[in-house]
C-alpha cells in the first residue's frame, strides 16, 4: 500500500519553499530536451505549466478538449486575482493573505501549501503584467485593487469583469510562443480516457480524438493533470458544460487517491435557474458585492416590484447578521444565508429562490458611469440573459455549484500517490480546505502552473530512474483495450433514457441531498438513489452513432459514468465527516445561531480515498492536519 507522506519541508513556515527549491535537484539546460512531459489541460494551471516547461526546454505534449486552449474554463473567472502587494497600504501582507485563506477554508488545508500560495501571489502579478495583462489602474498609473469576500483589505487585482479571460490570454501568448519554438506540441479536441502506468510510474495516457473517434497512445517521462473541478456532477453549475472529472477520475481508478470529495463550493452570486431545460447556470461575479447590497423583503411572499418596497420594509440580511463584513462575507456564509431567507418564503422572483443584489445606493453615491466602468460587461451579460436592466432594477441572484475544493491528493510537490503523476490547480485538493475565498482560484492555477509544477517536476525527472518506454509496451495495449471495451459497452446498451435525462436525475439528487446543506438521513438516501441511477445507466442508456466518429452523446455518456461513481463517493465522504466546515454543512452540526460547527478533535484531517476495484468499497486514509503557526478558532465574520 502507498504510504501517505505529504513531504512538507522542515524549518520555519516562511522559509519552507525557498529551502525546498534549494534542496531540489535540477536538470541541466542541455539535458532538458531529453525529457518529455504530458500536460493534460490548457487553462491557467495547465497552459501556464506547459508554457513554462517549454520555455525551460523540455518537450511538452499539451492536451485540451476544446478546439483551442483559449476556450479553457479559466476564461470564465471574472472578478479578480488575489496578491499580497499591499498597494493600498491597508495592512496587507503575505502572512495576512495566508491567514485569511487558511481561516476562510475553515482550517482544513495544509499550512505549508497555503503559505507558499500567498508567497507566490506577488510573482504572479509581476509575471502577468510583464505579459501585458491589462489590469485596472488608478489615475496615476499604479495597479488598482478591490475587495473580495472574507477579507478586510483590498488585494484583488482585476481587469474589469474579464480577469480570467485576460490572464488566460497571457498564458495563451506564452504557450503559443513555445508552440512556435517547437518545445510544446498542442493536441486540441483530445480527451484523456486513461492513465498508463509502467513499473509503478505514470508514463503515458490514452486519449480519444473527439472529431474522428480514434484512440491514441502517448508516452512521456511524467504526466501533469490540470483538468479543473467536478461541479457538473450537480448537472446545473456555473462550469462550462464540457468541464468534467474524467481525467482525474480515471487516474483515481489507476491508483491516485481522491481527497475531500465532499468539499464543494456553492457560489452565492449566480443568476437563478429559470427552468428545466437549461444546461448550465451563469455566474455573476462576487466583485459585485463590493457595491451591490443584498436584500429580501421583510414580509413573506411579497411580490411587489422591488423599487416599490421601501427601505424600512427591506431586510439587508448579510449586513444585519454580519456587520463586520456585511455583503462581503465568504461565499459559503453568503450562500447559506440566502438559502435561509428563501426557505422562509422571502425569496424574490418567480421560483422564488432568489435574492436582490441592488446597486441603487452605489449609483446614487458614485454615479452610473463609475459603476459601468467597474462592472459594465457583467451588467451587459445580466441584461442579455434576463432582459432586465440592472442599472434600473436589482439583479436577482441565487447560489449555484461553482468550484470543488476536493480533488486528487497531492503532496507538497503536487505529486499524487502515483509516482510521476502530478496534479495542479482545481484538479488537486491542496490549497483551499473546506471553502475557497474569492479571487483565489486564479491565484492557485497560476502559482501551480508558472512556479510550482515546473520546479517539482524537474526534481522528479532529475531524481528518478526513467528508462525509455514505447507506446508499444503492454501497459499501453492493456489501457487502450480497456478504454475501447468501455466505449463499445456504452454503445451496446441500447436503452430508452438519454444521457441528459440520467444526468439530470443525478443532479437533482446531488443538489437536494449533497448540496448546500446535508444531513445523515439524506446522504444515506442519496447513496442508494445514485446507485439506482447507476444501475439504470448500465441497463437503459440510449446512445446513437458510432465510436469512430464525432459523437457528442458518447462523450457525455463517458463523463456521466464517472460522475455517477464520483457522486456516490462525494456522498460517502460527506456522511463520514460528522461536522460542519466551510462548504460542507451538516444540519446536525450547527451552532444555536445556525452557523457551521467544526469538530477539530475528530475531523482535523484530509480524507484520501483509495479505489479498491469495481463493486468494492473504497478505503479512506487520513492525512492529519498540523497547525503550528495558526490556532484554529471559530470562524466569525460578525
Image: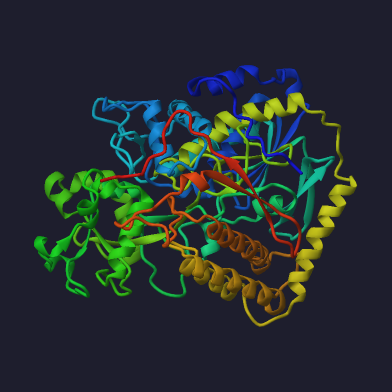
Left/right placement of residue 52 relative to residue 305 reads: right
Residue shown at 23%/53% (left/top)?
321
Decide which of 553, 294 is in the foreground and name it: 294
Tell me, yes or no, if residue 279 can be seen here: no
At x 19%, y 46%, the residue is 369
Residue located at (32% from left, 29% from top): 143
In the rendered view, would you say 591 is above or below 537?
above
Residue 36 in percent (x, y) is at: 75, 33
Residue 572 percent coordinates (x, y): 59, 61
Q: Nearer the viewer, residue 397 or 637?
A: 637
The figure's colour scheme reads rainbow
Numbered marks: total: 0
- Name the image quarter holding residue 149: top left
Q: Quadrant of residue 91?
A: top left
Judge left or right: residue 567 versus residue 126: right
Relative to 606, say whether 619 is above or below.
Answer: below
Judge by depth and name the residue closer to the eye, 510 or 63.
Answer: 510
Amino acid at each position: 500500500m502507498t504510504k501517505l507522506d505529504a513531504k512538507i519541508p522542515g524549518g520555519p513556515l516562511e522559509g519552507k519553499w525557498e529551502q525546498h527549491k534549494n534542496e531540489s535537484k535540477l536538470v541541466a539546460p542541455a539535458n532538458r530536451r531529453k525529457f518529455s512531459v504530458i500536460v493534460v489541460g490548457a487553462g491557467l494551471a495547465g497552459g501556464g505549466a506547459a508554457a513554462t516547461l517549454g520555455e525551460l526546454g523540455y518537450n511538452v505534449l499539451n492536451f485540451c478538449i476544446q478546439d483551442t486552449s483559449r476556450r479553457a474554463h479559466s476564461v470564465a473567472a471574472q472578478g479578480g486575482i488575489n496578491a499580497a502587494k499591499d498597494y493600498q497600504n491597508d495592512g496587507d501582507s503575505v502572512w495576512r493573505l495566508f491567514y485569511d485563506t487558511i481561516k476562510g477554508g475553515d482550517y482544513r488545508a495544509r499550512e505549508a501549501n497555503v503559505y507558499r500560495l500567498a508567497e507566490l501571489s506577488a510573482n504572479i502579478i509581476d509575471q502577468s503584467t510583464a505579459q501585458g495583462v491589462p489590469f485596472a489602474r488608478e489615475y496615476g498609473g499604479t495597479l488598482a485593487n478591490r475587495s473580495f469576500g472574507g477579507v478586510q483589505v483590498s488585494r484583488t487585482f482585476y481587469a474589469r469583469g474579464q480577469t480570467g479571460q485576460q490572464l488566460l490570454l497571457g498564458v495563451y501568448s506564452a504557450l503559443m510562443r513555445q508552440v512556435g519554438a517547437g518545445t510544446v506540441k498542442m493536441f486540441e479536441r483530445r480527451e484523456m480516457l486513461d492513465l498508463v502506468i509502467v513499473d509503478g510510474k505514470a508514463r503515458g495516457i490514452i486519449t480519444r480524438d473527439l472529431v474522428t473517434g480514434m484512440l491514441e497512445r502517448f508516452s512521456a517521462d511524467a504526466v501533469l493533470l490540470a483538468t479543473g473541478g467536478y461541479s457538473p456532477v450537480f448537472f446545473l453549475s456555473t462550469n462550462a458544460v464540457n468541464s468534467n472529472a474524467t481525467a482525474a477520475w480515471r487516474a483515481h481508478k489507476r491508483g491516485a487517491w481522491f481527497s475531500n470529495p465532499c468539499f464543494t463550493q456553492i457560489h452565492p452570486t449566480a443568476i437563478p435557474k429559470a427552468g428545466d431545460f437549461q444546461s448550465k447556470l451563469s455566474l455573476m461575479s462576487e466583485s459585485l458585492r463590493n457595491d451591490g447590497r443584498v436584500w429580501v423583503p421583510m414580509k413573506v411572499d411579497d411580490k411587489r416590484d422591488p423599487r416599490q418596497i421601501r427601505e424600512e420594509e427591506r431586510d439587508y440580511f448579510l449586513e444585519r447578521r454580519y456587520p463586520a463584513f456585511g455583503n462581503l462575507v465568504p461565499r459559503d456564509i453568503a450562500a447559506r444565508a440566502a438559502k435561509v431567507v428563501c426557505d422562509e418564503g422571502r425569496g424574490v422572483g418567480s421560483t422564488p429562490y432568489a435574492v436582490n443584489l441592488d446597486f441603487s445606493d452605489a449609483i446614487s453615491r458614485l454615479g452610473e458611469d463609475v459603476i459601468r466602468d467597474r462592472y459594465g460587461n457583467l451588467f451587459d451579460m445580466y441584461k442579455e440573459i434576463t432582459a432586465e436592466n440592472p442599472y434600473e432594477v436589482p439583479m436577482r441572484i441565487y447560489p449555484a455549484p461553482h468550484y470543488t475544493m476536493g480533488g486528487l491528493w497531492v503532496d507538497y510537490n503536487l505529486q499524487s500517490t502515483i509516482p510521476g503523476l502530478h496534479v495542479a490547480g482545481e484538479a488537486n485538493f491542496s490549497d483551499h480546505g473546506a471553502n475557497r475565498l474569492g479571487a483565489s482560484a486564479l491565484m492557485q492555477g497560476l502559482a501551480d502552473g508558472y512556479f510550482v509544477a515546473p520546479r517539482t517536476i524537474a526534481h522528479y525527472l532529475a531524481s528518478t530512474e526513467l528508462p525509455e518506454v514505447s507506446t508499444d509496451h503492454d501497459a499501453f495495449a492493456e489501457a487502450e483495450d480497456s478504454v475501447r471495451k468501455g466505449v463499445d459497452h456504452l454503445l451496446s446498451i441500447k436503452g430508452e433514457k438519454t444521457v441528459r435525462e440520467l444526468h439530470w436525475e443525478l443532479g437533482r439528487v446531488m443538489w437536494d441531498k449533497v448540496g448546500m446543506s446535508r444531513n445523515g438521513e439524506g446522504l444515506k438516501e442519496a447513496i442508494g438513489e445514485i446507485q439506482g441511477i447507476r444501475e439504470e445507466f448500465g441497463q437503459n442508456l440510449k446512445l446513437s452513432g458510432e465510436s469512430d466518429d464525432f459523437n457528442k452523446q458518447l462523450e457525455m455518456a463517458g463523463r456521466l459514468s464517472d460522475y455517477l461513481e464520483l457522486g456516490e463517493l462525494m456522498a460517502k465522504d460527506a456522511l463520514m465527516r460528522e461536522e460542519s466546515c466551510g462548504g460542507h454543512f451538516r444540519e446536525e452540526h450547527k451552532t444555536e445561531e445556525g452557523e457551521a460547527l467544526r469538530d477539530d478533535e475528530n475531523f482535523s484531517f484530509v480524507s484520501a480515498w483509495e479505489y479498491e476495484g469495481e463493486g468494492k468499497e473504497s478505503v479512506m486514509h487520513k492525512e492529519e492536519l498540523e497547525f503550528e503557526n495558526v490556532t484554529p478558532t471559530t470562524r466569525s465574520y460578525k
